[in-house]
Image: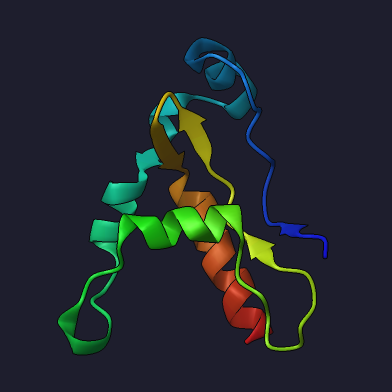
């Protein structure tokens, strides 16, 4: 099963300075925890957990038709994960379009 990339993939193994040049500035990225805290509450008033956003990056969301999963582009710096808000918005729109 292949995955569908929503945006440019993050460069693996690059330092923060190199990634900033490649990705147009590290300052436009937000931590996975920050992205999760900005989302509306789900069922029963529960918030989206950061691990859910990491899973959207690693395994993606499989559309109802069973085609390739749609993955959220993310950048790993050390042990932390970061997501560009614009890429997150594209991901949500792509998943919503398929649903």
Q: Is residue 46 above or below residue 50?
A: below
Q: Position of residue 82 (x, y in %)?
A: 43, 39
Q: Is residue 55 above or below residue 10?
A: below
Left-right relation of 39 to 21: left
The residue furthest left is 45
Q: Residue at x 20, y 77 (%)?
A: 46
Left-right relation of 71 to 50: right
How many tags in the picture?
A: 0
Left-right relation of 3 to 37: right
Q: Position of residue 93 (x, y in %)?
A: 57, 71
Within the image, what quadrant is residue 21 found in? top right
Q: Quadrant of the N terminus?
A: bottom right
Within the image, what quadrant is residue 3 found in? bottom right
Q: Residue at x 30, y 68 (%)?
A: 48
The colour style of the image is rainbow
Q: Residue at x 42, y 23 (%)?
A: 78
Left-right relation of 15 to 12: left
Q: Position of residue 34 (x, y in %)?
A: 27, 49
Q: Quadrant of the C terminus?
A: bottom right
Nearer-the-camera pick, 20 or 41? 41
Within the image, what quadrant is residue 60 found in? bottom right
Nearer-the-camera pick, 37 or 60? 60
Q: Residue at x 60, y 71 (%)?
A: 61
């Amino acid at each position: 099963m292949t995955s569908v990339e929503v945006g440019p993939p993050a460069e693996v193994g690059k330092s923060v300075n190199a990634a900033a040049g490649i990705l147009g500035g590290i300052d436009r990225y937000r931590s996975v925890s920050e992205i999760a805290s900005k989302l509306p509450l789900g069922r029963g008033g529960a918030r989206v957990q950061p691990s859910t956003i990491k899973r959207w990056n690693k395994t993606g969301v499989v559309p109802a038709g069973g085609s390739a999963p749609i993955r959220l582009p993310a950048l790993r710096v050390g042990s932390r994960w970061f997501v560009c808000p614009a890429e997150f918005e594209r991901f949500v729109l792509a998943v919503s379009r398929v649903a």
